[in-house]
Image (tube, grey):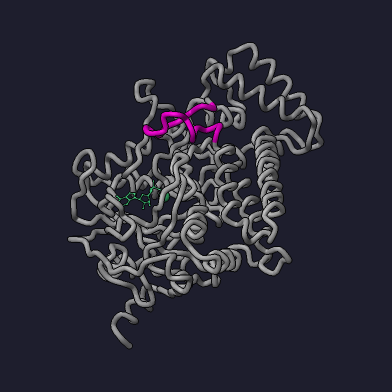
Amino acid sequence: MTEKKEIADQIGWNFDNSYSRLPESLFTKLNLTPVRSPKLIILNHPLAASLGLNGTALQGNDGVAELAGNQVPEGAMPLAQAYAGHQFGHFNMLGDGRALLLGEQINPLGERVDIQLKGSGRTPYSRGGDGRAALGPMLREYIISEAMHALGIATTRSLAVVSTGESIIRETEQPGAILTRVAASHLRVGTFQYVSAWGTSQDLRALADYTLERHYPEVANDENRYLSLLQEVIKRQAELIAKWQLVGFIHGVMNTDNMTLSGETIDYGPCAFMDTYNPETVFSSIDRQGRYAYANQPHIAAWNLARFAETLLPLLHDNREQAVTLAEDAISDFVKMFHHHWLAGMRAKLGIFNEEQEDESLIEELLSIMQKHRADYTNTFRALTLNKLEDTVLFSAAEFTQWYEQWQARLGRQQESQASSYQLMRSSNPAIIPRNHRVEEALEAAVEREDYRVMERLLEVLSNPYAYSTEQEIYSTLPEESTRPYRTFCGT
Ligand code: AMP
Ligand code: MG
């Protein structure tokens, strides 16, 4: 047995590299760019176990060297993926500029997931960038992606963050770091846009067949399997975006290269959770037009999916006009499906089991009173769930009292007991979200003082957002007015 194989067996790597068998124009094989002195900052033990990896072995020198991109694990075949994308509406050639795909780990259940290093150095797609990432933003992605997972929202996961022992230059000098990202795949709308713009028709078909086989095998033998692919991606995105809206998650940079075909949330850059309820909320410093504002997310998703549909036109039908009709019908279904999921989710947030025509106006009415009185989104639903209507501006408003009576009457018109309503609300309204000031506090302790305990405690309470535990109470307090409005940044 070679030494490398022994290490892989100890750690539990079980790589395949199906992406490297796609047409060559889709990726570039890479050599690693070693970093000076890698140090493990955090490792996700439960995730490691579910991948069939031995956390203890992964924490050893060889494991950390692999997570830092200093050593290639046995069976891995590092590559950077090519893709394009509409960034704030403008079409660009992109690709992994600071990431490399090690390969696909086959977990003990036989499932295939990408293992990707983010911040691992320059690639042919780096354009002007340094290929690196800073520790703060990588820990931020770790915290928020794991919080999303715990909220029951499809997302890429975070296996580990290592610091590199090298400084990188942003606005200030920052410690460099590499995040190990785990994803159902890194196939994006932008991957199809890249092939559609620069590949051959065979490349497009190969990519579509690969996506079907990897994510939608149940429809891979349909008569028009490419239409089924489009419909399935639309279905998953409708469900995903509804879940974002229901917890107040704002992605911040919904470019087409940041929309997956698996239906997972990807790329935690300038994202943040909404505090005060306002549909126009934008956190990203560069989103001056509000393109990616909270209320715009479903529209942008439909816009992105239309770009995806366009790439599939040659596969949908030999007749261009008929292909366009098929694509348009599929896209118009997104709006209906999104609305269906959103309404069902909102009913659950209010403890409503059955359907009445007026439910939507009851929901809209609450949201509009919340907006008027600048109520906190998460805490309003938390208070309704706990039935503890503290002395806030919202709860003291006459309009709210009126609304509350209507809501109670509505609950009274269903068979389920009040107790089951509150049970439903508890499982639909998180007691805790990664609040911006809490995330900042954890990152500051980690990056400025190398104190990781604040982050570990935060991760602990975020890991079960529906627990309504006493430890979570303190995490639901709001920040001082002076720390708002919160701003997030790209180019991290
Ligand atoms: P994002 O906004 O993170 O989705 O990134 C958009 C594009 O810019 C992707 O192609 C990234 O790989 C690339 N990129 C972001 N940061 C860097 C960097 N520091 N060096 C090289 N490429 C980068
Ligand atoms: Mg991206």
Q: In the figure, 371 relative to 233: above or below?
A: above
Picture coordinates of residue 209, whole percent (x, y): 59, 67
Q: Which residue lies at the image location 72% right of the left edge and 19% below the top edge? A: 405
Q: Which residue is drawn at 31% across and 60% down?
A: 124
Predominant secondary structure, magenta span: loop
Image vertical order of residue 16 relative to residue 224, above or below: below
Given residues 117 and 476, the one toward you in this image is 117
Q: In this view, does 262 lie above or below 430?
A: below
Residue sitting nearer the eye, 276 or 252: 252
Q: Is residue 458 left or right of residue 223?
A: left
Residue at 27 percent across and 50 percent down: it is 128
Q: Residue 43: in sight, yes or no?
A: no
| Left or right, 87 with reference to 298 | left
Residue projecting furthest to the bottom: 1
Toward which corner of the image does residue 120 lie, by quadrant? Answer: bottom left
- x then y, percent, for residue 412: 78, 28
Residue in the foreground of this view, choosing between 217 and 166: 217
Which range is magenta?
Answer: 279-296
- Picture coordinates of residue 68, whole percent (x, y): 28, 62
Q: Pinpoint residue 190: horizontal percent, then vertical percent.
A: 48, 53
* Quadrant showing the N terminus: bottom left
Instruction: Name which quarter of the figure residue 160 lies in.
Output: bottom left
